[in-house]
Amino acid sequence: MVVLLGKGDGTFQPPVTLTVSGLHPSWVATADLNGDGRLDLAVVMDTGVFGQPATLAVFLGQTNGTFAPARTFPLHSSIHARLAIGDLNGDGKPDIAVVDGTTLQADIMLGDGAGGFSEAAILPTTDFGAGPFAIMDLDGDGKLDMVFTECCGESEAFYLLGNGDGTFQPRQYFSSGSSTTALAVTRFSGSNGPDLVMAQQGGTWIPLLNAGSAPAPASAAPPSGSGTGGTFTFTFSDSGGYQSLKVVDVLINSALDGHNACYVAFVPSGASAGSLFLVDNAGDAGGPYQGLALPGSGTISNGQCTISGAGSSAAGSGNNLTLTLAITFSSSFTGNKVFYLSAGDTSSNNSGWQALGTWGVPATPSGTISVVSLTPARGAAASGTPQTFTAVLTDSKGAGDFGVVNLLVNNFIDGRQACYLAYAAATNSLLLVDDTGDAGGPFAGSMVLNGGTATIQNSQCSVNATGSSATQDGNTLTLTLNIAFQPLFAGNRIMWLAGRDAAGGNNTNWQAMGTTTVQ
């Protein structure tokens, strides 16, 4: 890499070469990385071989316009990586994000303010072919966000909203035109900004105006439980203020399906008022439906649930809208259900559906086996963090009658690209299905519980025998699992349990018992 220092008259001094042995530069940016008032260089360097990790090289500026020898920091990104600089965790010190040129995986390198950097997170992606990317505050909350574009014929881009601590929310996609070759950040007249301009392969360019807000479901309370009804509180947020929320939705069903669901839309008209719409059994969000004004005292119902105005309310404050609903479930709407939430704003931004809770509507068991509980029923942790999950099942013939217990963690009841586990009671062994998701195998690994030290893993999770166990007490089987989810498995996930007896005659089928967020 060559540096040419300006003379101030439009000409330059002789070039100075900066090198790191065996590596080639692919991207460079300047900033004062150690707080001494002088510009420094941050350079991504690689071997030129696909799959080999790249290196972050930092050349600290000296008083005479020269640079100190490089300080190097390992990366997970490979060739053709790009970087951008910004304070990602709000400590006043510059940090660096490095994006792999092929996979769009991002290394988040937090700065120590003295020119040193350490990797705080790896942001995985299933996208391919990196275009330009940038760091900016998209939603005006004072926390830096990131925008990623794609090359090679791809027509989507996405952004990650920052949490202000070096971590980021799940990606949100938007249309960007085909094969972005350049990205500029600006503010157009009349826009909330910052706005984007994207140059496309072939000579076209696309301006993208910032709507200035981001709607999102925040929580469901209680996050789990059981009963024929109750008072449920659903919270939604928008970085532009709760007034930016146009409609919020709650869908309660065993799967993400409006048919035969308790499916509600609320359209706010003030801080504590709005219209509640309950979709009929056909599940079409456009109607027909029954309506109820809040505050109010009437009721609305379909084949799955009844919602009472008395006990229901809405409250907007700051960025949050809280919707409280008094719900009674129908006697035919039994089994374990998932709380799915979504939010849309006045600029047509939409969060998409997010699974944030589970609820069991009791029914008379069809067999001798029952799924009782999963603890915690609602969790959230950074990828790689070990978590203990405890599943409790009962068999009226005694715990010795159990054959197999399954735990499936995914967005849907789909064993592919899932954390899909089977506990075989006869051998006291735990099996982890591989990424292809076939319950019959092949398996990513297996191990014996109660005293073992092995670890089994696939691309979605790892399970450590230390901290995992299976115990029987009377009719009760308690399965405790020490699980860490992988970075590639980031996002909101649903946790299903199922059990069957040794003879295979009784089966609980899949029961949604909890949700977890992999950060």
Image (tube, rainbow, N blue to C red):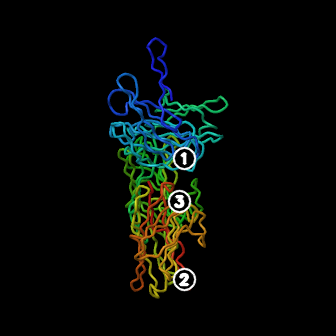
Q: Name the residue under label 2.
A: 506
Q: Mark 1 or 2, which is nearer the eye?
A: 1
Residue 356, x across and y down, in percent: 45, 59
Identified by mark 3, the residue type is Ser
Q: In this view, does 287 lie to the left or right of 469?
A: right
Residue 291 seen by the camera: no
Lower position in the chain sequence, tag 2 or tag 3: 3
Identified by mark 2, the residue type is Asn
Residue 422 seen by the camera: yes
Badge 2 crowding class, 10 Å Cα cut-off, few under 14, some 14 to 19, many 20 or more, is: some
Badge 1 crowding class, 10 Å Cα cut-off, few under 14, some 14 to 19, many 20 or more, is: some
Q: Mark 3 points at which residue?
A: 459
Q: How far apart are marks 1 and 2 (CA)?
A: 51 Å
Residue 23, x across and y down, in percent: 52, 38
**Residue drawn at x 61%, y 39% as measured from the top left:** 151
Lower position in the chain sequence, tag 1 or tag 2: 1
The answer to whether marks 3 and 1 mark residues whose Cβ atoms lie closer than 8 Å is no
Q: Mark 1 points at which residue?
A: 52
The answer to whether marks 2 and 3 mark residues whose Cβ atoms lie closer than 8 Å is no
Q: Is residue 205 left or right of residue 330?
A: right
Q: Distance between the residues labelled 3 and 1?
A: 20 Å
Residue 251, x across and y down, in percent: 50, 59
Task: Check disc 2 and report its element: helix, strand or loop.
Answer: loop
Q: Is residue 63 left or right of residue 343?
A: left
Lower position in the chain sequence, tag 3 or tag 1: 1
